[in-house]
Image: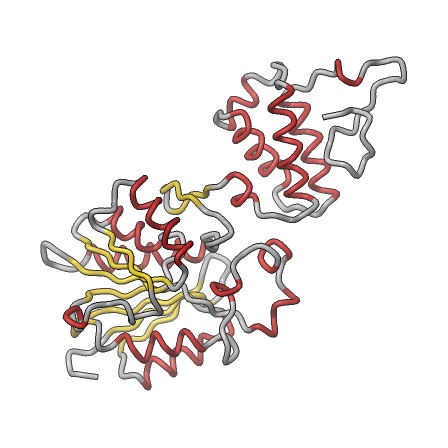
Amino acid sequence: MSSSAAPADPAPVSRPAASDNPAARVWTSLDLIQWTRAFFERKGIPSARLEAEMLLSEVLGCPRIKLYTDFEKAVPDDKLAVFRAYVKRRAEAREPLQYIVGWTEFLDLKLKVAPAVLIPRPETEELAEWAIGILKALPGECLKALDIGTGSGCLALALAAKEPRAQVTATDLAKDALGIARENAVNLKLDARVSLLEGDCFAPLPPEQKGSFDLIVSNPPYIDPAQKAALQAEVRDHEPAAALYAEEHGLAVIRKIISGAGEWLKPGGRLGLEIAPEQAGEVKALLGTAGFAEIEVRKDAQGRERMAMANRPPSPL
């Protein structure tokens, strides 16, 4: 990183005197964190220091704590060049940090992510925790779960990782997304218990699996396309549109899942959905119309209604 760069450029802003040799400037991890934090703050990046630390730890291949225990060590020039490129992508292009580093954590699982899949959010973790609790409370040696629109595989893989009795099927329309989910399953050594199928919602499932699932979960596309302009640039400009937006004010895919889930669930099986807060009332009504009972909507950590769970009654729908 050249110390003679203009302040708006993602390179350290402290400038040597004219007689100094910019190439001779030594940058330590602490120098880079402090400069990048200030730069990110000027650019409106939230959690500026944390993101600076995460990018630098990724470039250096070390835990974040080591950035401070080795704070006086010079960062090699080749690493500086990579770090500078990462900072520019984050601040100028507003590319999500998770896409830059290529991974994220989901319930302590390390998952590969790329622009072909959504970046898992905290509310999806909360849905996963709710669903895992339901599975753990069920009797039996083998439990069957289905994840609709799996993306990175975060929900399917969390269910399999946290409940060893679970055999999980996951579907997605996007071949590229399934490739990433498959890679994550292999990396986590869960590929023997997670089956990935390409297709729309329930379409790729074999007919003999009807009425066999203890649990169906989904984080479907649920954003109204009319809201696109109001989204953060990180979401609007980088995450896959097909996984974000749905017609009918964001409810088109949710309607399809609710209308089809009954014939795939066991009597007493559960359907869990991530939803937008403004959809809670409509989703409850849709579930009731489809014959579901024990309908519950939960709030996320921010106090927004973001998850719905319902039970297929023992009697046929």
Query: In the image as oriented, which residue stretches furthest toward the right?
Result: 18
x, y percent for residue 88: 68, 39
Q: Is residue 44 shown above or below 169?
A: above
Query: In the image as oriented, which residue stretches furthest toward the bottom?
Result: 289
x, y percent for residue 205: 24, 67
Q: Residue at x 21, y 70 (%)?
A: 269
Residue 25 occupies quadrant? top right
Residue 70 occupies quadrant? top right
Query: Looking at the image, what colour scheme do you see?
Result: secondary structure
x, y percent for residue 107: 37, 46
Residue 134 vs residue 187, the one in the foreground: 187
Q: Is residue 65 shown above or below 235?
A: above
Q: Residue at x 21, y 77 (%)?
A: 263
Left or right: 10 with respect to 20?
left
Residue 113 vs residue 74, the one in the foreground: 113
x, y percent for residue 189: 26, 40
Q: Residue at x 68, y 19 (%)?
A: 27
Quadrant where the N terminus sits is top right
Q: Is residue 28 shown above or below 59?
A: above
Q: Residue at x 39, y 49 (%)?
A: 180
